[in-house]
Image (cartoon, grey):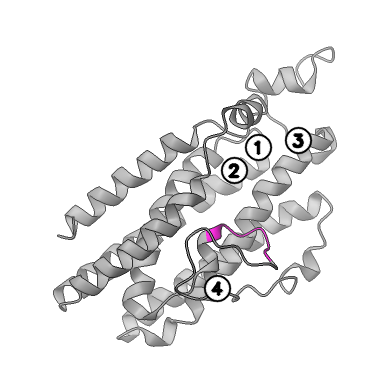
Amino acid sequence: MADDNMTLESYLAQGGVLTSPANASPRYRAEVMKIMATFVDSELAGAAGFADVVNKAPGLRERIAASKIVLEKTRHAETVLELMGEFGTNTARYATSHPWAARLARDATADTRRSDHDMRLSVFNYPLSGWVDAVTMNLVMGLAVGVQLGDLRKLSYQPLAEKFAEIAPVEANHVKLASEGLAALVEAGDADAIRLSLDYWRARVAPIFGSEDPTRFKSLAALGLRHRSSAEMRADWDAALGDALAGLGLG
């Protein structure tokens, strides 16, 4: 910290960064842990769900791409989990701590919660339904992840911000793979099935940005843990998805 007389809150509010849990207040530690756990649990749940559809891919090239996504999401979970270990998390037991493949019924309403809920984003409570649906979800959610990582890579906890900066281009490539996969499916005559999946997943991805809570946003922004509002990020996601769908002839 630049000035020993400056409080942690003042330091962070002026754009300061932390590099170790030892320097963090209990509240700051709790908020950073929540960010990390949400990301790790979402990556593990997402990888588990996508692994189930690898063998439903129409060809070897698509199976390789799907397997690559599963591997990289699991690796992203591992790299952030390592940081959680520095905060006291038992990393050795984490991978088996929740049923990552658990899902609600496909027709569950978009605001339904599992009773044994871990910290995954709510969208990962819903099951994939075949290859077309999986590729569609990968595009819709992948674009949302890109928007979120744009904010997360500016976190005041520098080690985590650096991890997210490394992860962002890999996740962006998952969007590229999804776009290429959808283009092939459109050419194969699956546009109507894609549109049905789009309706399903748009309704379930939109809530992950959270509701507007100006007081909480201001509090997290003062700690350097949020930089853009939920509404701003949701609008960016919606615009990016619109552009992607227009490029595929699905707009």
Q: CA distance from mark 2 to mark 4?
A: 34 Å
Span colored in magenta: 117-122
Q: CA distance from mark 4 to mark 3?
A: 33 Å
Q: Residues within 10 Å of mark 4 (few under 14, many from 20)?
A: some
User: Nearer the N terminus, badge 1 or badge 3?
Assistant: 3
Is residue 119 within the magenta segment?
Answer: yes
The dot on residue 104 is 4
User: Nearer the N terminus, badge 3 or badge 2?
Assistant: 3
Mark 2 or 4: in front is: 4
Residue 77's spot in the image, x, y percent?
Answer: 62, 61
Q: CA distance from mark 3 to mark 2?
A: 18 Å
The dot on residue 28 is 3
Q: CA distance from mark 1 to mark 2?
A: 6 Å
For the residue marked with disc 1, what is the amino acid? Gln
Answer with left or right where residue 165 lies relative to residue 224.
Answer: left
**Quarter of the picture holding the C terminus:** bottom left
Answer with left or right where residue 113 lies relative to residue 7.
Answer: left
User: Nearer the N terminus, badge 4 or badge 3?
Assistant: 3
To which residue does mark 2 refer?
A: 162
Residue 178 visible? The answer is no
